[in-house]
Amino acid sequence: MTRLTRKALTTSLGFQAFLALLIFASAGTVHYWQGWLYWATFGVASIATALYFARTDPALMERRMRIGPTAEVRPVQRLIQAATSLLLFAMYVVAGLDRRFGWSSMPAALVWCGNGLVVVSILAIVPVFRANSYAAATVKVETGQPVISTGPYAIVRHPMYAAAAIMFLATPFALGSYRALPAAALIVPAMVVRLLDEEKALSAELPGYDEYRRKVRWRLIPFVW
């Protein structure tokens, strides 16, 4: 096992432990089958993806390891990342509290559909990473970075955000919580603000990006926006 693979595995397992703490401590019980199903589904899919790219594209994974508000170079991105982190925290905690106090009564079919969409969204990120080894977790243009216009980038300019939006909106359903939907929904406009600022940085610092913007008109949803 390489150093990067160990780091990717350790980071992923650490996040899974933190996620379990958020969900089940908020729920006040481990008897929360929706929580266990989501935790296992998200964990297996995300850890498998991380280990795969740690082996096949170490440079990408090194860039993906630098994450969070403190890793951002642009001040506005630090604020956006901080707000998004708080919303994510709120989404998981509210879902757990929903289980504790019985606020929601969601059909099992919706829970399974939510988990299915979480898997689909993670799988949708795989071709994004394959096409773009510079898909860092922070907004930063590196020396020699090319404009990527192949794969999912030939359809929308921000395919990773599009996939992430699906995952965030699906998570409350996967956890069986209607009450967690507002926090999840607020993450989407936060991502929109993030990508608009990111486009400013790319236009200013990445040669050829404005030409790419003219070629690929849609940011997140084809024929819509």
Image (tube, helix red, strand yellow):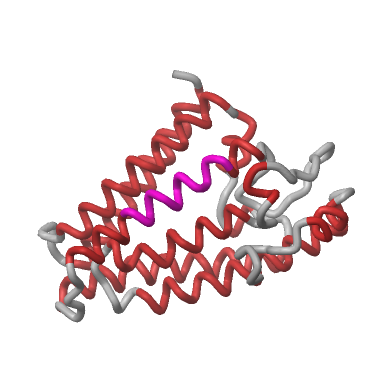
Quadrant (top left/top right/bottom left/bottom right) for the C terminus: bottom right
**Quarter location, residue 196:** bottom right
| Relative image position of residue 189 (x, y in whole percent) | 57, 74
Q: Is residue 25 above or below residue 122?
A: below
Instruction: Please indicate whether residue 209 sits to the left or right of residue 2 in the image.
Output: right
**Residue 93, x across and y down, in percent:** 31, 69
Q: Residue at x 33, y 40 (%)?
A: 44
Indicate the position of residue 7 as horizontal and vertical percent values. 47, 32
User: Which secondary structure class fits the magenta region best?
Assistant: helix
Residue drawn at 30 percent across, 78 percent down: 179
Residue 9 is covered by the magenta coloring: no
Q: Residue at x 69, y 41 (%)?
A: 134
Q: Which residues are magenta?
A: 116-127
The residue depicted at 30 percent of the width and 47 percent of the height is 41
Q: Would residue 105 appear left or right of 200 to someone viewing this image?
A: left
**Whether residue 184 is situated above or below residue 57 in the rendered picture:** below
95 relative position to 162: left or right:
left
Q: Is residue 88 above or below residue 134?
A: below
In the orientation shown, which residue stands out farthest toward the top?
Answer: 1
* Quadrant containing the N terminus in the rendered view: top left
Residue 127 lies left or right of residue 46; in this view the side is right
Q: Nearer the viewer, residue 206 or 143?
A: 206
Q: Is residue 121 magenta?
A: yes
Residue 214 in the image: x percent, y percent?
Answer: 83, 60
Task: Depth check: give the residue in front, 61 or 154.
Answer: 154
Can you say whether 180 is above or below 158 in the image? below
